[in-house]
Amino acid sequence: MTEKKETVPPEYDVNAKWDACLDLTVRRFVYSSLGGAFAGLLLFRSPVTRWSSIALGAGIGIGSAYTDCSRSFDAPSSPSTETSVSQAADE
């Protein structure tokens, strides 16, 4: 009654890649939004421009996370081409 679990090589483990991408996207979205909010408080007086700086920061964070995630899904992981997504999965 022992179940045999198959181990999946890391380059084919899609669930781990999705988890790492989701974690990376949330972190970059939050940190860049906070950076945009801080810059908006320092540089702008109008609430509209402050909100737009937060939106710009959020867009930059999501865009950079999308770039790294698409790179990790397109190419198989090899020791010479490590991306920040595979490094985030190790954390």
Image: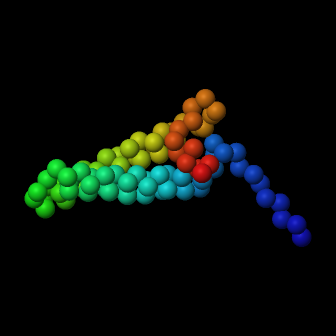
Q: Position of residue 61 (x, y in %)?
A: 35, 49
Q: Looking at the picture, does residue 51 appear above or below residue 57?
A: below
Q: Residue at x 48, y 56 (%)?
A: 22
> In this orientation, which residue lies closer to the viewer: 25 or 47?
47
Camera sees residue 18: no
Looking at the image, the residue that sits furthest to the top is 80
Left or right placement of residue 36 versus residue 28 in this view: left
Q: Quadrant of the N terminus?
A: bottom right
Question: Foreground: 83 or 36?
Answer: 36
* Position of residue 48 in the picture relative to residue 4 (left or right): left
Q: Residue at x 24, y 51 (%)?
A: 39
| Residue furthest front as drawn | 42
| Rendered position, 80 above or below 16 | above
Q: Nearer the viewer, residue 4 or 22?
A: 22
Disc count in the image?
0
Residue 49 placement: quadrant = bottom left
Residue furthest out toward the right: 1
What residue is shown at x 40% (from left), y 52% (from top)?
28
Residue 23 percent across, percent down from the top left: 49, 56
Q: Is residue 13 at least partly visible in the picture? A: yes
Q: Is residue 58 left or right of residue 65?
A: left
Residue at 83%, 60% (x, y): give it: 4
1 w.r.t. 62: above or below: below
Q: Residue furthest bottom?
A: 1
Residue 35: x and y, percent? Answer: 31, 52
Colour treatment of the image: rainbow
User: x, y percentage for residue 69?
Assistant: 47, 45
